[in-house]
């Protein structure tokens, strides 16, 4: 297996497969054997190792492949930048009051009336990752970018669907209430109701990340592309 793109595909499949295996069929027996802390340590180690392999494999693929469409124009970059702003708002909003995250108050949080970013979707963090992938593929439609972004988006969206099932088993009626009052698919009309903190924090994250994008990668992004 000497082809760099084939190695990247193998790394992406490993990244996806180990996440699903440890999150679902192997989770309960490993928690029983290792304890919750030991399992989280193993999970984190495997996640970091598989992601590092995928990142290194991505860098090893020559970037000169012919793009599938022209993603270098201002229209594509403007759309990708807008998508990344939404992704940043979703990510910041997901960090507070999220029943999907490990939290001893998760069942109580799930019984509350959804507010803030959860008016948009009950999986804002996962959708932020998927939108990250979509925005990057939009402006860089090459095979290596497609493999990387598909792996992250697939894991985020299919993983969140499976998380619904797992949370229902763990939390029962509390999660059922949360599902009835929230949406899996983002309801973009709810973005104005996301709240001041997600919008301010998300905008700051977006400005900082797009500035670093130009500094570290040499490709200006966001507003910095036109400043």
Image (tube, helix red, strand yellow):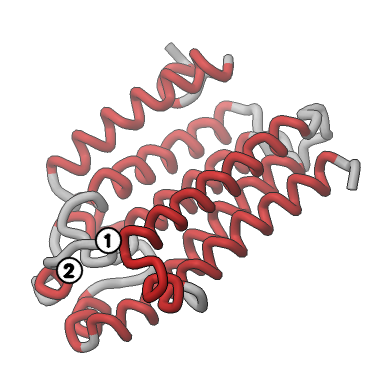
The C terminus: image quadrant: top left
Location of residue 42 in the rendering, given as x and y in whole percent from the top left corner: 46, 56
Question: Which residue is under mark 2?
Answer: 106
- Quick check: 189 above or below 105? above
Who is closer to the viewer here, 23 or 62? 23
Write down the quadrant of residue 76 in the picture: top right
Q: Residue at x 55, y 52 (%)?
A: 152
The span from disc 1 to disc 2 (Cα, nearest Å) is: 7 Å
Residue found at the very far right of the displayed protein: 2
Q: Residue 101, which numbered label? A: 1
Whether residue 161 is visible: no
Image position of 59 (left or right of 110) = right
Q: Residue at x 31, y 31 (%)?
A: 205
Q: Residue at x 25, y 72 (%)?
A: 182
Location of residue 128 in the rendering, given as x and y in whole percent from the top left corner: 40, 50
SS assignment at label 2: helix
Who is closer to the viewer here, 41 or 112? 41
Q: Residue at x 17, y 52 (%)?
A: 96
Image position of 211 (left or right of 70) = left
- Quick check: 82 above or below 38? above
Crowdedness of circle 2 by 10 Å Cα count: few (<14), some, many (20+)? some
């Amino acid at each position: 297996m000497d082809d760099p793109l084939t190695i990247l595909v193998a790394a992406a499949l490993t990244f996806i497969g180990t996440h699903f295996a440890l999150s679902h069929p192997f989770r309960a027996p490993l928690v029983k054997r290792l304890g919750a802390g030991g399992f989280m340590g193993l999970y984190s180690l495997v996640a970091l190792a598989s992601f590092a392999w995928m990142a290194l494999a991505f860098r090893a693929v020559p970037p000169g492949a012919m793009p599938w469409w022209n993603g270098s124009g201002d229209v594509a970059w403007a759309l990708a930048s807008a998508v990344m702003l939404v992704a940043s708002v979703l990510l910041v909003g997901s960090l507070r009051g999220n029943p999907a995250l490990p939290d001893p108050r998760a069942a109580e949080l799930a019984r509350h009336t959804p507010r803030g970013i959860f008016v948009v979707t009950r999986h804002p963090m996962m959708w932020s990752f998927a939108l990250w992938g979509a925005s990057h593929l939009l402006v860089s439609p090459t095979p290596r970018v497609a493999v990387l972004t598909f792996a992250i988006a697939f894991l985020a969206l299919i993983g969140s669907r499976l998380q619904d099932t797992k949370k229902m088993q763990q939390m029962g009626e509390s999660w059922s209430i949360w599902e009835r009052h929230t949406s899996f698919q983002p309801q973009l009309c709810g973005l104005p109701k996301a709240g001041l903190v997600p919008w301010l924090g998300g905008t700051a994250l977006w400005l900082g990340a797009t500035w670093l994008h130009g500094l570290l990668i040499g490709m200006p992004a966001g507003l910095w592309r036109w400043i």
